[in-house]
């Protein structure tokens, strides 16, 4: 690990050099010679971009040498004039690398120079250890604080009791340490929660460039040592580890211009670092002074952690308030004392409570009835409402309400909350849509009725005109009787189906065996076909299969037979070019189709979700035309693909099935037939 300085006018040059050298090197960047003076003391090697600086490179090299005559300076560039490179070598350039020829040699050159730095630093440190007096390495005798020290502690204690601004607290602490111990350079480094690195948040005696560029990583060097050891880092204990780790720590301490580094580790987590530079007098800090500052760091670390928690809570509170303020849904919450804790602006506007600046702390009786009652029942009894439609007389609005309990970290009920939306405009639109739908339906009924009556009356009228001349013909009379009877039955059937929609559907439910109900339905269809005496009807192939014999459903038997009859009859009538083949299978449904599960309300059976049975009615017809695959279309009233079809059978069937809490789904492939799948709640006999 090493600290490098890159001088270049191109910002993207840093990314290129970083990718080339890898993460083991920390790179500072500046674009002019003016900033070089403050950054050179922090690094071990300088790289000059000759391509962007050209002749200005000579000024940069001169300033670097003025700051540190022993500094290694490498130049990189492409197509740079030879006279510039030659002049740079005479000024103090260590080595020039042509990026056009071999830029990859930059890394080995830097490593070689850094190895020399490591070895030189190790020799200097070992010499220093030998020269250190035994008294400096031995602990001093403990003694009580002086009056000045007590005054110092009282001053910082008062601030810790009343300080709520983390920036003021850090700056106050640094000023206090500066005045008490006469330390020229100090820095406060805190963990960046987003980038997971440690950056300078406050400093004394350091330039803004240093504050901007410093970034310590937890996986190496100084931070790694502090996380592991949790103690102060001085030149003496730093030398007790392996020399490479010691060198990394030394370079990072040089980067933050500190001779002593103290951890801020309240509750075992390293949240920050305090860096102490040299004293103004040039003296080293004594062991006692380091211990005093270390003791203070323990307290200041706890205060900072509390302030960080406070800031996070304030941020979260502000974030949630902003969300609630801009939310289109209304939100109200109360605590255990039945006091309102949250009521967003949208809720106040919908409830006509705009006159209040804030409803926080108000009693729930401030809310229009029955909202307070619903919140209280959720709080006290645990009754949860989901999308419940409630009319509020005080504001003459219909609201869609959902409630839930609020629990604390120990899973104890601490309040309740309500989310609701104003359904009044939606209901108004639904009514308008329903009116338009009724008008359209009435127009369809009128057109269909006139069409059906005309179709039935035309053959009757034609035969009636022939009646005077052919009355003596017995075959004519039989034909007349048959046609008139059939057309009257057809008109009667049409009127009967229209009557189905004229009144609410009343169900008389009983427990029925599904296989028996299907069998009875088929018998009814066969009798009806025989009554019509059509030879083609005798060729219909009907087959049934039931995987489980004891499948029970709770239905109105007559209505359900009617519904299944309509579906089977429709399947039979779709097959025109071959012998109709209808396969009926009954089984337990593992799950409902997604689109159907959204429409069917959730039902419970003995505290568990209800099971469903399914009836699959498959034909061998041509399948549904592509444009008719939409469920909402094939079940529309008067929809039919047959010339003389009424188009109400599937509509009636779906209404009956949905009234029983079920649903119907068509599955079809062109030229492979259609399968109508009926889902019904399964009935379980009480134990």
Image (cartoon, helix red, strand yellow):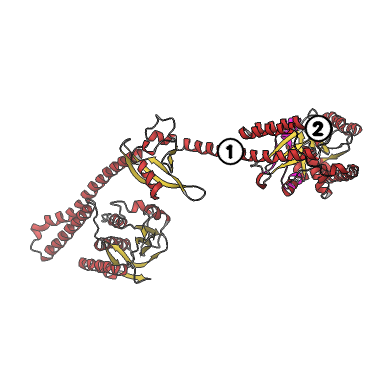
Which segment did they paint magenta? 196-224
Secondary structure of the residue carrying tag 2 is loop
Q: In this view, does 142 lie to the left or right of 540?
A: right
| Quarter of the rendering containing residue 680 | bottom left
In x, y percent, where is residue 465? 12, 55
- Residue at x-position 33% and y-position 57%: 661
Q: Where is 463 relative to 18, above or below?
A: below
- Residue at x-position 60% and y-position 40%: 309
Q: Tag 2 or tag 1, which sits nearer the N-term?
A: 2
Mark 1 = which residue? 310
In x, y percent, where is residue 337? 42, 41
Q: How crowded is mark 2: few (under 14 residues within 10 Å), some or many (20 or more)?
A: some
In x, y percent, where is residue 85? 88, 34
Mark 2 = which residue? 279
Can you say which quadrant of the picture contains the C terminus? bottom left
Magenta stretch contains residue 219:
yes
Q: Is residue 292 left or right of residue 455?
A: right
């Amino acid at each position: 690990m090493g600290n490098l300085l890159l001088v270049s006018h191109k910002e993207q040059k840093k990314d290129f050099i970083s990718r080339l050298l890898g993460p083991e090197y920390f790179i500072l960047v500046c674009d002019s010679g003016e900033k070089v003076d403050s950054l050179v003391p922090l690094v071990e090697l300088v790289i000059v971009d000759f391509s962007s600086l050209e002749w200005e490179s000579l000024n940069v090299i001169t300033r670097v040498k003025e700051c540190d005559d022993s500094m290694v300076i490498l130049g990189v560039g492409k197509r740079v004039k030879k006279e510039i490179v030659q002049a740079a070598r005479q000024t103090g350039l260590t080595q020039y690398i042509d990026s056009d020829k071999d830029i990859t040699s930059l890394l080995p050159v830097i490593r070689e120079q850094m190895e020399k730095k490591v070895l030189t630093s190790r020799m200097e440190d070992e010499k220093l250890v030998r020269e250190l007096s035994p008294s400096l390495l031995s602990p001093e005798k403990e003694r009580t604080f002086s009056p000045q020290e007590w005054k110092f502690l009282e001053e910082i204690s008062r601030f810790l009791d009343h300080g709520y601004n983390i920036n003021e607290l850090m700056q106050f602490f640094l000023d206090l340490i500066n005045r008490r111990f006469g330390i020229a350079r100090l820095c406060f480094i805190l963990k960046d929660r987003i980038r997971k690195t440690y950056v300078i948040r406050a400093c004394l005696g350091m330039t803004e460039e240093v504050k901007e560029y410093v970034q310590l990583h937890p996986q190496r060097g100084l931070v790694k040592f502090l996380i592991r050891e949790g103690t102060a880092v001085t030149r003496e204990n730093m030398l007790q580890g392996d020399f490479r780790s010691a060198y990394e720590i030394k370079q990072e301490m040089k980067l933050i211009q500190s001779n002593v580094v103290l951890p801020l580790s309240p509750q075992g987590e390293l949240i920050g670092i305090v860096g102490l530079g040299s004293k103004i007098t040039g003296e080293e800090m004594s062991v006692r002074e380091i211990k005093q500052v270390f003791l203070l760091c323990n307290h200041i670390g706890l205060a900072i952690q509390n302030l960080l928690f406070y800031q996070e809570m304030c941020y979260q509170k502000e974030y949630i308030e902003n969300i609630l303020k801009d939310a289109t849904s209304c939100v109200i919450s109360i605590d255990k004392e039945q006091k309102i804790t949250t009521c967003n602006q949208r809720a106040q506007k919908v409830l006509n409570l705009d006159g209040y600046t804030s409803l926080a702390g108000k009693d729930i009786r401030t809310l229009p009835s029955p909202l307070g009652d619903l919140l209280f029942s959720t709080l006290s009894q645990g009754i949860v409402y989901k999308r419940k439609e409630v009319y509020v007389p005080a504001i003459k609005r219909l609201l869609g309400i959902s409630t839930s309990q609020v629990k604390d970290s120990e899973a104890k009920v601490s309040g309740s909350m309500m989310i609701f939306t104003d359904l009044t405009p939606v209901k108004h639109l639904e009514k308008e849509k329903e009116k338009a739908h009724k008008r359209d339906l009435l127009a369809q009924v009128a057109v269909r009725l006139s069409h059906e009556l005309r179709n039935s009356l035309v053959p009757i009228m034609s035969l009636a005109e022939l009646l005077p001349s052919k009355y003596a013909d017995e075959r004519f009379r039989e034909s007349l009787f048959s046609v008139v009877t059939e057309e009257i039955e057809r008109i009667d059937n049409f009127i009967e189906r229209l009557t189905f929609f004229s009144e609410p559907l009343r169900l008389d439910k009983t427990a029925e065996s599904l296989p028996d109900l299907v069998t009875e339905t088929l018998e009814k269809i066969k009798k009806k076909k025989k009554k019509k005496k059509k030879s083609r009807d005798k060729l219909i192939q009907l087959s049934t299969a039931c995987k489980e014999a004891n499948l029970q459903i709770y239905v109105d038997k007559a209505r359900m037979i009617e519904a299944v009859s309509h579906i089977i009859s429709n399947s039979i009538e779709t097959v025109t070019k071959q012998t109709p083949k209808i396969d009926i299978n009954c089984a337990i449904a593992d799950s409902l189709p997604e689109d159907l599960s959204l429409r069917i309300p959730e039902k419970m059976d003995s505290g568990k979700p209800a099971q469903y049975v399914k009836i699959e009615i498959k034909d061998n017809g041509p399948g549904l035309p592509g444009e008719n695959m939409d469920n909402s279309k094939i079940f529309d009233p008067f929809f039919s693909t047959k010339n003389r079809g009424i188009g109400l059978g599937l509509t009636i069937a779906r209404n009956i099935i949905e009234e029983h809490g079920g649903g119907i789904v068509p599955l079809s492939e062109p030229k492979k037939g259609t399968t109508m799948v009926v889902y019904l709640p399964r009935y379980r006999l009480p134990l």
